[in-house]
Image: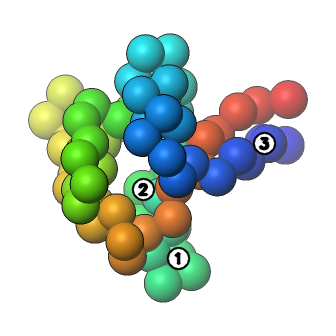
Amino acid sequence: MAINRRLSSDQDFEEMIKKQLRIRVFQDNQIVDASSNVVRFNDSVVVTQSGVSDIAYHDRKACEFFELRRR
């Protein structure tokens, strides 16, 4: 079972980049990114990468971000 912690501040995203922890991304109550690392972020976009060539751009206002941590 996974423990989910909501990510909302710049400090949260910086921690994800530093520790290379996986996140989940939800948009309109649906999972749009199940397990990826945060590569970059700014005030409007969060960039995630789940594979070598699998990069996604998520609107920060339209999506919800959660740290994915296993028990």
Q: Secondary structure at mark 2?
A: strand
**Mark 2 or mark 3: which comes first in sequence?**
3
Check disc 1 and give the amino acid type: Gln
**Label 2: few (<14), some or many (≥20) within 10 Å?**
some
Q: Which mark is residue 30?
A: 1
Residue 54, by quadrant, is top left
Contact, CB < 8 Å: mark 1 with mark 3?
Answer: no
Q: Please tell me which residue is depicted at 50% across the width and 15% down the height of the picture.
A: 19
How are the residues colored?
A: rainbow
Q: In the figure, is residue 70 to the left or right of 37?
A: right
Q: Which mark is residue 61?
A: none
Quarter of the image with the N terminus is top right
Q: Which mark is residue 2?
A: 3
Q: Please tell me which residue is depicted at 26% across the width and 54% down the height of the picture.
A: 43
Check disc 3 and give the amino acid type: Ala
Work out whether residue 35 can be spotted: no
Residue 69, by quadrant, is top right
Residue 24 placed where, x, y %?
A: 53, 51
Residue 47 placed where, x, y %?
A: 24, 45
Check disc 2 and give the amino acid type: Asp
Q: CA distance from mark 1 to mark 3?
A: 17 Å
Q: Secondary structure at mark 1?
A: strand
Q: CA distance from mark 2 to mark 3?
A: 15 Å
Residue 68, by quadrant, is top right
Q: Please tell me which residue is depicted at 56% across the width and 80% down the height of the picture.
A: 29
**Mark 1 or mark 3: which comes first in sequence?**
3
Q: Which mark is residue 33?
A: 2
